[in-house]
Image: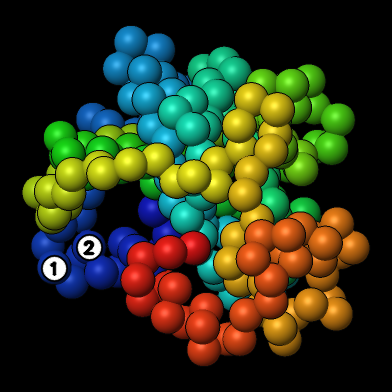
Amino acid sequence: MEFYTSSQKALQAEFDSSRLAERVHDLIVTDEIDPAVQQPFIESRDFFFLASVNAQGEPTVSYKGGGVGLVTVVDAKTLAFPSYDGNGMFLSMGNITETAKIGMLFIDFETPNRLRVQATAAISLDDPLMAKYPGAQFIVRAEIANVFVNCARYIHKHKRVSTSPYVPNATGAAPIPSWKRIDAVQDALPPNDASRALGAGGVITIEEYGEKLAAGES
């Protein structure tokens, strides 16, 4: 399969970048993780952005955060990462089960640096890596099609302040998020979450939740 589509090639021709695009591809695009440079970078990240598409061709992009080492380089052709508790919509994970095609973007905002991965993914509820990620609902394994570095010139520098308190600890436990305390969702929560919401300070209104978000609380 060719790396560039006909539409991408048409724009390259329009802006006289066809030769450059081919040269860039030849220089940086591979189908395996470089163990000396790319693997340490990926495994030093505690977040990445995940792009996926459903069977109707509708895309979504989500932020995936966790502890350092959120993504494991299983081998030169395979990445794996956990799926933690979310809002129950399963947009990205549902897309993976439908089309399997994903994009992953790793960024270091302090250096800055970034790496892009295109892959075919599948979810597993009994993956052996479950033990590495306490609190994970399941593991996603991604078979790499393309991996390449990206120019960092437009990355704005940001300084990391702290780790999210909602990342599951060594036993898989994590605080319940404030949105699960909203009155309008109480009758839709799984029983365990409903009882935890009451124990975390009780039910709040959606307006009160909005105030928490504005204050930087989750």
- Residue placed farthest to the right in the image? 191
Q: Within 10 Å of the Cα at label 2, are there few (<14), some (14-19), or many (20+) other Cα atoms?
A: some
Q: Tag on residue 216?
A: none
What residue is shown at x 67% (from left), y 21% (from top)? 132
Tell me where residue 116 appears, x and y as whole percent: 37, 42
Compute the Cα span from label 2 to label 1. 5 Å
Q: How is the image coloured?
A: rainbow
- Asked if the residue at tag 1 contacts the one at tag 2, i.e. Cβ–Cβ closer than 8 Å, the answer is yes
Q: Report whether 152 appears left or right of 44.
A: left
Residue 192 lies, with reference to residue 121, above or below; the image says below
Element type where label 2 sits in the image: helix
Quadrant of residue 53 within the rendered picture: bottom right
Tell me where residue 151 appears, x and y as whole percent: 17, 44
Whether residue 177 can be seen here:
yes
Residue 198 lies, with reference to residue 185, above or below; the image says above
Q: Report whether 142 appears left or right of 147.
A: right
Whether residue 180 can be seen here:
no
Q: Within 10 Å of the Cα at label 1, are there few (<14), some (14-19), or many (20+) other Cα atoms?
A: few
Q: Amino acid at mark 1?
A: Phe
Of 131 and 116, nearer the camera is 131
Of 22 and 132, nearer the camera is 132
Tell me where residue 38 appears, x and y as whole percent: 35, 23
Residue on which disc 1 sits: 15
Element type where label 1 sits in the image: loop
Residue 169 lies, with reference to residue 5, above or below; the image says above
Quadrant of residue 143 within the rendered picture: top right
Of 2 and 162, nearer the camera is 162
Q: Tag on residue 12?
A: 2
What residue is shown at x 57% (from left), y 29% (from top)? 79
